[in-house]
């Protein structure tokens, strides 16, 4: 393909950093045709995000683009462009969905203003920009676009923040859209909806898509061609089907395949107990009556749509947000071996600080949770020192050992957080949480933005801790990983639990229609799988104005849906041994 045939052409792209012996990118060459869908894959730190930054002229200050490198956007030579030419191109002709929404969004601006700015910056009148903004927020899955537009970034879930970035990038219908892990924080149903929307944009206006992702099955399903980077070099450029065959993507685990960790027949006393938990943000009830228990060495997976309340449960249990009602108790082992139960919601500041050593959170936005100027090893050692578990050189040695277990070697351990890739920062956050050996570890999207090899390292590290007695809460859109790590699973929808039980039932043979749609939307690497997906129509309801009756009924595809579904809310009831669901159309066991 020649430069004149392509919408984007890159030749001999070299990017260097003064403090790194190895180039961030070296000799990268490829071309993109109008409307083409290209997947860009590679391990964490391979150079994928650096490539995206170079194509937008957004390289960090310590990175240098080689003068011999060429980037052509249509007939514009971007490698020779001045600041004004770059400004006119960004957003209008080539746009980027950034990887870490919490860092990309301005915390002091409302979401609507930030999305609309993508249009006003290119001369679109304010009224038209606002109209486009509301239309796009609705398209990417906001049930109440006006309410979303009034919100600030911290008031949205991680998945909602991701959708806001996608809306801003798509607002001007660019010729090239670079999506850097655009679906990392999205559940499978919204993930499919967003990717369908990106596909519709391609069909409507011919937008070319560069999809950067660690999810090889997703790339195989959605892309025509795949570029694979390794240590800054382009080592593979081929049709997606051939890449799929070479990397055995069809052998990747799905929710109905692979090992399932067995569930204890008679669990011991709970180390964590959550009863009738309710969380409100103003007039919005984000969590509605959630209850569960975890014993030592047990694990619970929590899955569901972005904004359904999963992270709010994690933040409420760890006292990071206020709890409207309910009870949360923690029973950690003491030095004498005897357990003492703590009422977490009643603890004052100092007792709560001490208790947090026993209940740790791996946050969803790892980059936003780490002090950017501290080194990886210092961040991990800090927790050990704060809780009096180790000091000085001993703390640093333990930190380095944990980081090495997660694939962060000595060189990376000495780098500042801001110098690490997103996947590397994710592993630092995990190391920091497990360093203090808590009784309970709450993992909010621990596998987001990591490559397959790193995913295995993290899963093995979590499995080792669980076998050692740590109780795990796994909040994730990665359903195969939940199935592998957690013997129990809970599906949430609009703040409530709609299915709960053994993972082998809930994530293999789900009964509630929403849970069925969730499982059916998981990418498998099979291009035909999207045709077998259960498609949910209609918008996600706003938690500020939930539907009457069953909250899922406006989108429910059940053929026997009737007026009762819209009038009465079904309770969570047993439908089989060790399996509960909330739906009026499910067969109940004979005893009922």
Image: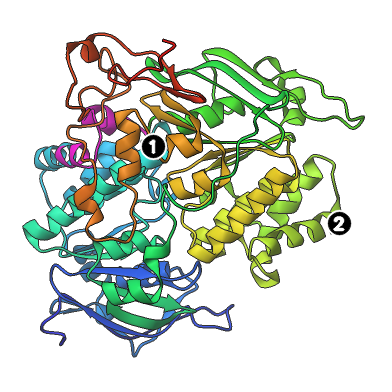
Q: Is residue 536 left or right of residue 423?
A: left
The magenta stretch spans residue 195: no
Measured Cα–Cα span from mark 1 to mark 2: 48 Å
Q: Position of residue 520 (x, y in %)?
A: 31, 44
Q: In the displayed image of the protein, which residue is found farthest to the bottom? A: 68
User: Can you tell which mark lies on residue 40?
Assistant: none
Residues in magenta?
135-153
The residue carrying pointer 2 sits among few (fewer than 14), some (14 to 19) or many (20 or more) residues within 10 Å by Cα, namely some
The answer to which image quadrant residue 95 occupies is: bottom left
Q: In the displayed image of the protein, which residue is found farthest to the right? A: 336
Give the foreground label among 1 and 2: 1
Which of the pair 13/45 is nearer the observer? 45
Q: Position of residue 504 (x, y in %)?
A: 48, 39
Q: Is residue 550 above or below residue 73?
A: above
The residue sitting at 74% across, 36% down in the picture is 357
The magenta stretch spans residue 139: yes
Q: Position of residue 89 (x, y in %)?
A: 20, 66
Q: Which residue is mark 2?
A: 394
Tell me the element at label 2.
helix
The answer to which image quadrant residue 437 occupies is: top right
Tell me the element at label 1.
loop
Q: Is residue 317 left or right of residue 226?
A: right
Contact, mark 1 vs mark 2 (Cβ under 8 Å): no
Which of the pair 315/251 is nearer the observer? 251
Q: Which residue is mark 1?
A: 509
The residue sitting at 26% across, 12% down in the picture is 548
Q: Is residue 465 left or right of residue 500?
A: right
The answer to which image quadrant residue 147 occupies is: top left
Which of the pair 575/163 is nearer the observer? 575
Whether residue 178 is visible, yes or no, is no
The residue sitting at 60% across, 55% down in the picture is 458
Q: Is residue 166 above or below residue 32?
A: above
């Amino acid at each position: 393909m020649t430069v004149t045939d392509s919408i984007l052409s890159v030749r001999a792209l070299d990017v260097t950093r003064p403090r790194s012996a190895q180039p961030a990118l070296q000799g990268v060459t490829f071309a993109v045709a109008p409307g083409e869908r290209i997947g860009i894959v590679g391990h964490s730190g391979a150079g994928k995000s650096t490539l995206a930054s170079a194509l937008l002229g957004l390289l960090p200050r310590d990175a240098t683009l080689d003068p011999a490198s060429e980037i052509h956007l249509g007939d514009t030579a971007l490698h020779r462009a001045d600041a004004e030419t770059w400004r006119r191109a960004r957003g209008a002709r080539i746009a980027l969905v950034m990887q870490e929404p919490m860092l990309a969004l301005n915390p002091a601006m409302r979401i609507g203003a930030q999305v609309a700015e993508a249009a006003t910056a290119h001369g679109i009148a304010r009224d038209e920009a606002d109209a486009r903004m509301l239309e796009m927020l609705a398209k990417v899955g906001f049930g109440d676009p006006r309410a979303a537009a009034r919100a600030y970034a911290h008031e949205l879930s991680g998945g909602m923040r991701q959708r806001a970035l996608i809306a801003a990038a798509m607002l001007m219908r660019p010729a090239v859209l670079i999506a850097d892990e655009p679906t990392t924080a999205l559940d499978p149903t919204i993930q499919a909806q967003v990717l369908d929307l990106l596909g519709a944009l391609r069909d409507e206006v011919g937008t070319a898509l560069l999809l950067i992702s660690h999810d090889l099955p997703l790339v195989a399903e959605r892309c025509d061609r795949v570029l694979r980077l390794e240590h800054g070099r382009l080592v593979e450029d081929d049709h997606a089907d051939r890449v799929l065959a070479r990397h055995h993507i069809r052998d990747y685990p799905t929710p109905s395949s692979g090992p399932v960790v067995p569930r204890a027949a008679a669990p011991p006393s709970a180390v964590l107990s959550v009863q009738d938990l309710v969380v409100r943000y103003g007039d919005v009830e984000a969590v509605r009556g959630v209850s569960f228990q975890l014993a030592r060495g047990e694990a619970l997976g929590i899955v569901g749509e972005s904004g359904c309340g999963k992270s709010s449960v994690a933040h409420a249990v760890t006292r990071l947000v206020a709890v409207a009602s309910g009870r949360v108790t923690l029973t950690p082992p003491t030095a004498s071996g005897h357990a003492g139960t703590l009422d977490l919601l009643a603890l004052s500041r100092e007792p709560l600080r001490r208790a947090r050593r026993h209940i740790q959170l791996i946050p969803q936005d790892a980059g936003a949770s780490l002090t950017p100027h501290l080194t990886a090893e210092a961040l991990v050692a800090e927790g050990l020192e704060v809780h009096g578990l180790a000091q000085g050189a001993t703390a640093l040695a333990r930190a380095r050992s944990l980081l090495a277990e997660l694939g962060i070697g000595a060189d990376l351990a000495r780098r500042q957080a801001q110098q690490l890739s997103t996947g590397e920062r994710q592993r630092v956050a995990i190391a920091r949480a497990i360093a203090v050996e808590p009784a309970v570890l709450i993992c909010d999207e621990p596998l987001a933005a990591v490559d397959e090899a790193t995913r295995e390292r993290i899963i093995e590290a979590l499995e080792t801790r669980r076998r050692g007695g740590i109780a795990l809460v796994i909040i994730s859109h990665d359903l195969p990983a939940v199935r592998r790590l957690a013997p129990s699973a809970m599906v949430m929808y609009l703040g409530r639990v709609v299915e709960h039980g053994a993972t082998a039932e809930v994530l293999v043979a789900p009964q509630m229609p929403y849970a069925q749609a969730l499982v059916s939307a998981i990418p498998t690497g099979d291009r035909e799988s999207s045709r077998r997906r259960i498609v949910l129509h209609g918008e996600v309801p706003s938690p500020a104005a939930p539907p009457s009756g069953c909250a899922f009924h406006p989108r429910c595809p059940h053929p026997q849906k009737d007026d009762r579904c819209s009038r009465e809310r079904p309770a969570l009831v047993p439908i089989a041994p060790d399996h509960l669901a909330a739906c009026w159309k499910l067969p109940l066991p004979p005893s009922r």
